[in-house]
Amino acid sequence: MTPICMFDEISDPGSKAIRHDDQSLFAVRWRDQVYLYRNRCPHRGIELQWQPDQFLDDSQSLIQCATHGALFLIESGECVSGPCAGDKLESVACSVAEGTVYLEE
Ligand code: FES
């Protein structure tokens, strides 16, 4: 397991970009859980954020791609609106222990 950030670094709800080796990932904290995804939109294969560390929509309840506005469920990464509807973000296993978020490898 690799520590990637502190749990309290992410507001609830909120999101944070994570660089791990050469991988671009992002973490979303929502309802006291953390979800980790590869930072790659299934539509065009590009990064999702519209500002540094900003991956959520205005309602702070969905992940939003900045380029064409696709919306994804935070819990599953499923695209529920936009050009890649029905597709999914690639989730990455993570866990939280003693205030630290770990990438499970
Ligand atoms: S690149 Fe994400 S919706 Fe088009």
Image (cartoon, rainbow, N blue to C red):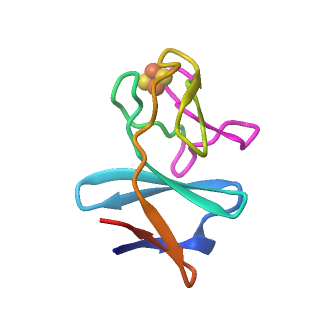
Looking at this rendering, what residue extends furthest in the left direction? Answer: 22
Residue 52: horizontal and vertical position, in percent?
A: 51, 49
| Residue 101 lies in the magenta-colored region | no
Residue 31: horizontal and vertical position, in percent?
A: 73, 58
The C terminus - image quarter: bottom left
Residue 91: horizontal and vertical position, in percent?
A: 43, 47
Q: Which residues are magenta?
A: 51-69
Count of numbered marks: 0
User: Which residue is depicted at the point 60% across and 46% down?
Assistant: 75
User: Which residue is depicted at the point 36% across and 23% down?
Assistant: 44
| Nearer to the camera, 48 or 85 | 85
Left or right side of 72 for 30: right
Q: Is residue 44 above or below residue 105?
A: above
User: Which residue is depicted at the point 53% across and 19% down?
Assistant: 85
Left or right side of 16 for 18: left
Looking at this rendering, what residue extends furthest in the right direction? Answer: 59
Residue 59: horizontal and vertical position, in percent?
A: 76, 38
Q: Is residue 57 above or below residue 8?
A: above
The N terminus - image quarter: bottom left
Quarter where residue 98 is shown: bottom right
Looking at this rendering, what residue extends furthest in the bottom direction? Answer: 98
Q: Main secondary structure of the magenta part?
A: loop
Looking at this rendering, what residue extends furthest in the top direction? Answer: 83
User: Which residue is depicted at the point 40% across and 22% down?
Assistant: 43
